[in-house]
């Protein structure tokens, strides 16, 4: 009797995205052996990185230690600089976990496709609007909020987090709710 071929393992992808601005810290925080090991222990099999202008930072993270951890875990990693919004949507659709800057567009897409998302506000941006949005979305249990120093805790938490799914009633409703929440944040900032 011939041995049976084993079932192929389904790809469980992590998508890391910095958006359209530079966010070197996010790339450097995720692409380290302990995070790769953690993602592997959660059953993820590949990582796709959208690094923006930070090609050199991404390449510098591909150390022999990182490559060895990827090989040990049987994980693959690929990357690209930029893509149009349709391509980013496709990346999100096929990811099981998104680790992202806290931009509203990325959060919206993740909510639309009911994806697990860890958001890390890019504090180098003016007015900390990403921090305000991340705080509110985390408070509402739509995202897990992390920062560069505790991204391991946020990723670990994402595995069992009781994500609240946004109602699937169309993007107009979401846009209205998001605008309402941002208005509240603006008023709190102005008067609080």
Image (spheres, grey):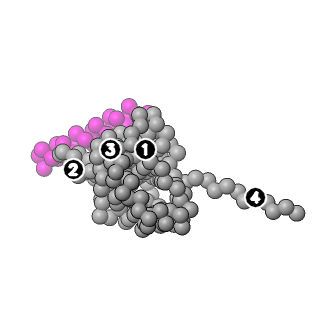
**Label 3: element kind:** loop
Q: Does the residue at mark 1 contact the one at mark 4 (Cβ under 8 Å)?
A: no
- At horizontal 34% and vertical 51% (from top left) the residue drawn is 56
Label 4 residue SS: loop
- Residue tagged 1: 80
Q: Which comes sooner in the sequence, label 3 or label 2? A: 3
Asked if the residue under mark 2 is in contact with the one under mark 1, i.e. CB atoms within 8 Å, the reply is no
Instruction: List x then y, in percent, for residue 173.
Output: 38, 34
Of the two numbered discs 1 and 4 on the same chain, state the one appearing first in sequence.
4
Between 91 and 192, the one nearer to me in the picture:
91
Q: Which mark is residue 5?
A: 4
- At mark 1, the secondary structure is strand
Query: Looking at the image, is 176 positioned above or below residue 156?
Result: above
Cα distance in 3D space between marks 2 and 4: 50 Å
Report x, y in % for residue 43.
Answer: 54, 61
The label on residue 53 is 3
């Amino acid at each position: 009797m011939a041995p049976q071929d084993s079932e192929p393992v389904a790809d469980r992808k992590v998508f890391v995205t910095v958006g359209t601005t530079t966010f070197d810290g996010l790339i450097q925080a995720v692409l380290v052996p302990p995070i790769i090991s953690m993602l592997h222990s959660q059953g993820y099999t590949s990582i796709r990185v959208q690094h923006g202008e930070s090609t050199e930072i991404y390449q510098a993270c591909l150390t022999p230690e990182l490559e060895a951890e990827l090989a040990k875990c049987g994980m693959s990693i690929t990357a690209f600089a930029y893509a149009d919004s349709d391509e980013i949507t496709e990346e999100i659709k096929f990811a099981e976990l998104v680790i992202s800057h806290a931009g509203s567009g990325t959060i919206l897409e993740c909510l639309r496709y009911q994806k697990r998302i860890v958001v890390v506000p890019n504090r180098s941006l003016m007015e900390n609007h990403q921090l305000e949005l991340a705080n509110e979305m985390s408070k509402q249990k739509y995202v897990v909020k992390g920062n560069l120093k505790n991204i391991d805790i946020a990723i670990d938490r994402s595995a069992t987090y009781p994500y609240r799914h946004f109602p699937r009633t169309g993007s107009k409703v979401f846009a209205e709710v998001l605008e309402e929440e941002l208005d509240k944040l603006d008023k709190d900032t102005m008067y609080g």
